[in-house]
Amino acid sequence: MTGSRLRAISAVAAAALCVALLGCGEKSEPATTGPVVTSEEQGKADIQAAQSAANAFLISSDAAVVCDKGITPSLLKKTYGDRKGCLKARRPASLAKSVQITSSQVNDGTATVVATAKGGPYGKGEKVTMTVVRDGGGNWRVSAVKSNAKVGP
């Protein structure tokens, strides 16, 4: 064999070896096809979900949804006694007519939402501070409420 022919065979062998090595890898993973959710986006989604739960607690006329999914079982028991008491207490006159969220903070599945509620027992405007927690199913529920609004007869 001549030197140029030997160099050509060596080059082809080296190229084949490179191709074979490039095909080897630790493992093959499919490309990501869905949206990538960043922690900042998740934080914004958590704040929006916590605010939505707080807003629903103050103004929603759908008592069954609030009593069953919008508040924690401990708040239900402490505030209303049971589901029947919750359904009875959440009549239109007991709800705010409007709500403005003034601040929100989320930290590891617990949010503090501060709002100004107007109408109903909140009169011309009352500050309401709510603790909202993410339950095991990922739903946000109001777990505590602080306000100076007059409640009851």
Image: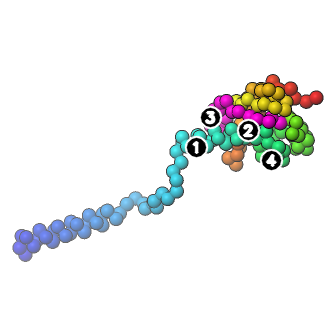
Q: Earlier in the sequence, mark 2 or mark 4?
A: 2
Q: Secondary structure at mark 3?
A: strand
Q: Which mark's residue is nearer the viewer, 2 or 1?
A: 2
Q: Which mark's residue is nearer the viewer, 2 or 3?
A: 2
Q: Earlier in the sequence, mark 4 or mark 3?
A: 4
Separation of marks 4 and 3 at Cα, in angstroms: 25 Å
Q: Earlier in the sequence, mark 3 or mark 1?
A: 1
Separation of marks 1 and 4 at Cα, in angstroms: 24 Å
Q: Point out the stretch of residues depicted in magenta.
A: 95-113
- Examine the rendered structure and indicate whether residue 38 appears above or below residue 31: above
Task: State left or right for residue 6 relative to residue 120.
Answer: left
Q: How dense is the environment of label 1, judged by Cα within 10 Å: few (below 14), some, or many (20 and up)?
A: few
Residue under numbered circle 3:
107
Q: Secondary structure at mark 4?
A: helix
Q: Amino acid at mark 2?
A: Asn
Residue under numbered circle 1:
42
Residue under numbered circle 2:
55
Residue nearest the viewer, comparing 72 with 15: 72
Q: Amino acid at mark 3?
A: Asn
Separation of marks 2 and 4 at Cα, in angstroms: 13 Å
Q: Are marks 1 and 4 in contact (CB under 8 Å)?
A: no
Seen at 17% across and 67% down, the residue is 11
Q: Are marks 2 and 4 in contact (CB under 8 Å)?
A: no
Q: Are marks 4 and 3 in contact (CB under 8 Å)?
A: no
The residue furthest top is: 148
Residue under numbered circle 4:
65
